[in-house]
Structure formats: structure tokens, C-alpha cells
Image (cartoon, rainbow, N blue to C red):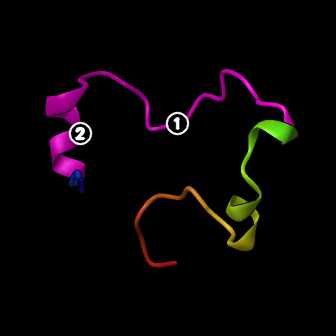
Amino acid sequence: MIVEPDELDEIAPCRSQTIEVSDFVDLNAIAPVCFHRTYYVAPRGKH
């Protein structure tokens, strides 16, 4: 699902645009297939 910037306030008014890491999992809990690709979380923009 793609949420446009102007929709963010409607979905969650007065919320920040930061991601809070609440916990980590053990390395053994991640399937090895997940290591074949790099994943990034970033805002949409020029980069």
C-alpha cells in the first residue's frame, strides 16, 4: 500500500515521521533466504 504524504495526517494526526525500533530478534529466527538481498527503509524523495 502506498500512502501519499498528504494522507499521513489523515491516517495518524500529530504523529512524527520517525520509526521506533522496539525490539530485535535472534539471528537464528531469520530465514537464511532473507540474507540474499539488502533491505532499506527510507522516505520517498530525490534519492
Residue 35 sits above or below residue 19 on the image: below
Left/right placement of residue 39 relative to residue 16 reads right
Of the pair 23 and 3, the residue shown nearer to us: 23
Q: Secondary structure at mark 2?
A: helix
CA separation in Å, label 2 and label 1: 12 Å
Q: Which residues are magenta?
A: 5-27
Left/right placement of residue 3 relative to residue 25 reads left
Q: Residue at x 84, y 32 (%)?
A: 26
Query: What is the three-letter code of the residue carrying label 1?
Result: Thr
The image's mark for residue 8 is: 2
Quadrant position of residue 46: bottom left
Q: Residue at x 25, y 25 (%)?
A: 12
Quadrant position of residue 23: top right
Q: Residue at x 52, y 78 (%)?
A: 47
Nearer the N terminus, badge 2 or badge 1? 2
Looking at this view, name the residue that lies furthest to the right.
27
Of the pair 16 and 1, the residue shown nearer to us: 1
The image shows residue 20 at horizontal and vertical percentages of 60, 28
Left/right placement of residue 21 relative to residue 25 reads left
Left/right placement of residue 10 relative to residue 1 reads left
